[in-house]
Image (cartoon, rainbow, N blue to C red):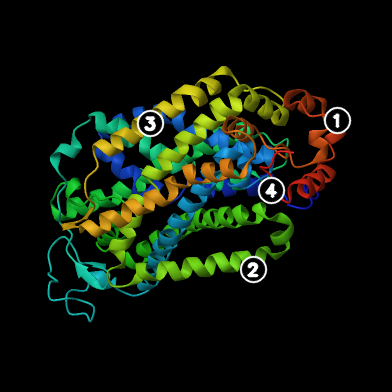
Amino acid sequence: MEGDENVERGNWSHKMDYMLSLLGFAVGLGNVWRFPYLCYRNGGGAFLIPYVIMLLLSGLPLFLMELALGQFSSQGPISVWKLSPIFKGVGIAMFTISSLIGIYYIVLLAYSLFYLFASFTSELPWNTGCTNAWNTPDCTISNHGMIWINGTWYNRTEIQDTELWNASKRVWRDGAIQIFFSLGTSWGQLITLSSYSRFHNNCYRDAVVISVLNCLTSFYAGFAIFSVLGFMANEMGVKVEEVADTGAGLAFVAYPAALARLPISPLWSSLFFVMLLTLGLDSQFAVLEALVTGIVDEFPRRLRSKKMFIVLGVCSIGFLLGLPLVTQGGFYLLQLMDNYSGTFSLLIVAIVECLVVGWVYGCDRFLDDIAMMVGSRPCLWWKVCWKALTPLSLLFILIFQFTVYSPTKYGDYTYPFWSEVLGWCMVGVSVLMLPAVALYKVCCARGTLFERVSFLVEPSWDWGPALDRHRDGEVYQFLHGRDKAATDHREMSDFIRQATGGDETTKI
């Protein structure tokens, strides 16, 4: 590709850069430390049935929706909601969720980096007994190995409740949740990455390819994880479920203990933590880009030339907010953020996102937008998913999440009540953006309440392709009902700003 199509905003220099960035974001730590455990816990191959079904019902439709939204509008996760300004809170909620996730996700990479350098020794330090400076009086030596968390090497021997191992309704819940979170939908990153694509890029094909590769990577990770954990269980003479774990416990507890039993253990440990770093860095870069793009696209004339300073500011704030997570009890804070910042709120945002595109903006209009970009209209399946199947499947996940909710625990430690309140505050600060922004928009508009709402649910005057040549086409004029006298996007932009004083929600 020669030169940028969108000179002001920029485009991907090559299609492969875009595809690898998408794949790098979608394939993250969850593919390694969550999918293999869920697959094992739910009967192995039987888990793949609900996993694939939920991929078709919720994961892939949402993935395609967000790629198409970003590519069609060339806007970030906040500005893209010009398609229905009253729901701009969806974008701000995505921004808030990404901010919270970015704070603790980078700490996981810091842990990986720390463990990586700790592996550069002739013998792994978490396998050297209880005579080290970091050990507490509670340190004991057993066949299960010594594990170091927050300055203490300790023995992790807890056994999972046998009820969790039955192939039941939990299988569908786990399959749905895993595919939803694995693809990274409704965070805002997919919209951001696709917003730098060229207008006629085949986003339909991209969505299918990346989703399939993401699932295959998760499947492959299962072999890498459980081949080592199976070796550890055999060495110790215990069942696999006694050494299996999920999340950060797998990455920084169970797997390092297993690696310590292998020949040339420092080598395998170093390779494992290099893998975690490379997996996580791509996802973290996408989180950072979504935050920066979300800010810059809201005030492009003022901030686009100062993007470097925005990046520096976002990184500095994230660094300061992440410091409590690396203190003595920081791992417990990290688990709390992981449990609340991107679970309930993310599902609610995804449901609203589907309803807005499917019913408010309209599936037919959205399918026509995709046809403008790729040259053909997607089949009826996508319309059925966006209007019914996807939001219903997400609602099922949300309801099930509430029914099985229990206070947060980490190992044998039960979190105090105030921490539960803090967790639900993280949920609330994201979800409350939806009604708060809608109320603000309605209050700023003019006319009766019905006129205000009717005006704000329709796309704003500047919604659509970023470049005039894509707006000037007969197809776009026919689909969006724009008068050709107003196709010069720049002149119309200046006129609206002068007439409204910069408030895009004001009726002229």
Q: Residue at x 60, y 25 (%)?
A: 362
Q: How many angstroms separate mark 1 from mark 4 (CA)? A: 24 Å
Q: Given the image, on which type of amino acid does mark 2 rest?
A: Phe
Q: Residues within 10 Å of mark 1 (few under 14, many from 20)?
A: few
Q: How many angstroms separate mark 1 from mark 2 (CA)? A: 39 Å
Q: Secondary structure at mark 1?
A: helix
Q: Foreground: 143 or 14?
A: 14
Nearer-N-terminus badge (4/3): 3
Q: Residue at x 37, y 49 (%)?
A: 427
Residue 314, percent from left and from top: 55, 64
Q: Secondary structure at mark 4?
A: loop
Residue of label 1: 484
Residue 72, percent from left and from top: 68, 37
Quadrant containing the C terminus is top right
List the single residue furthest toward the front.
448
Q: Given the image, on which type of amino acid does mark 3 rest?
A: Leu
Nearer-N-terminus badge (4/2): 2
Q: Secondary structure at mark 3?
A: helix
Residue 97, percent from left and from top: 46, 51
Nearer-N-terminus badge (2/3): 2
Q: Residue at x 53, y 49 (%)?
A: 92
Residue of label 2: 309
Q: Given the image, on which type of amino acid does mark 4 rest?
A: Asp
Q: Foreground: 87 or 55?
A: 87
Q: How many angstroms separate mark 1 from mark 3 (CA)? A: 42 Å
Residue of label 4: 503
Whether the residues at callouts 2 and 3 have beta carbons within 8 Å, the answer is no
